[in-house]
Amino acid sequence: MKTLEEAKQAVIDDFSMYDEWLDKYEYLIELGKNLEEYPEESKTEDKLIKGCQSRVWLDSKVEDGKIWFKADSDAIITKGIISLLISVYSGRDPKEIAEDDFGFISQIGLKENLSPTRANGLVSMIARIKELAAEMVKVEDTKSNGQEVLTAEDAAELAPLYDNVVLAIKQVYDPEIPVNVYDLGLIYELVINKKHEAYIKMTFTAPTCPMADEVLAEVKKSVADVPGITGCEVELTFEPPWDQSMLSDEARVELGLDLND
């Protein structure tokens, strides 16, 4: 199997063979046609990637410390895009995926040559792949620290609950910036254990935030109110210090910042 860097370079090389984007779209369509068949019974609501105009399903499993993806879409171009992504990242160490910047997407110019809705969908696909990988990293970290171990089945079962907790956190806004605390990158850690207790480590854009206690309490209440959550603990930290690199693409758009900064 190619290394991650080799796989990304192969994609860059493949795209460089075509001068016109019409030909590159045809290439994406062919990738989608060759995508491994996705089971109909797995096309469930919890497998849908939120933020995509077309329906995109993404499933994952862990075998021998590697995370494997299966995907499908009801739109031909979108199917090609998700096929491209999982061809690069499926079968790799979750930590390697979670820490990757997906910069090869910018090198091939894919996002810039998609419609705004498809470009947003691409961002959502990348975010979901990184999110699933990050969840698996937490499982491995839990094992190495001798804490309660979550199996891959546990993680899959908790995924919908995790999504609902993220949605709840996104209802809480920074008192000085018109963006929710999740997209601002203020949430450093989110763990849900087998008892459905949530643990959140978060920060603020500055240690002197006058509304810190109120925001912490609001996050705790919002998460505790999620159906299925049995408890919530929120810890404040300023290590590492927050900076703009932690903003999500959605937050950058909201604040009028360049996505490449």
Image (cartoon, grey):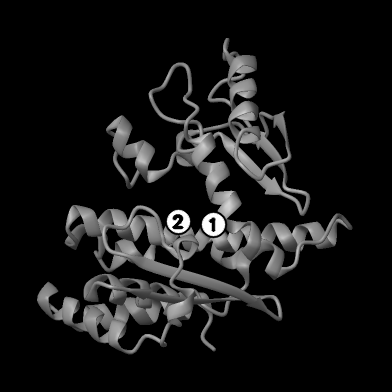
Image position, residue 37 (x, y; %):
41, 87
Q: Residue at x 66, y 33 (%)?
A: 224
Residue type, mark 2 in image: Ala
Vertical placement of residue 187 versus 49, above or below: above
Q: Residue at x 55, y 72 (%)?
A: 60
Whether residue 136 is visible, yes or no, is no
Pointer 2 with pointer 1, Cβ within 8 A: yes
Image position, residue 48 (x, y; %):
42, 62
User: Which numbered marker is on residue 84?
Assistant: none
User: Which numbered marker is on residue 131?
Assistant: 1
User: Which numbered marker is on residue 127?
Assistant: 2
Q: Nearer the viewer, residue 58 or 146?
A: 58
Image position, residue 111 (x, y; %):
26, 60
In the structure shown, which secondary structural element does the residue marked by tag 2 occupy? helix
Image position, residue 196 (x, y; %):
72, 48
How far apart marks 2 and 1 lie (CA) works out to 6 Å
Q: Residue at x 22, y 54 (%)?
A: 117
User: Is 192 left or right of 214, judged from the image as shown?
Assistant: right
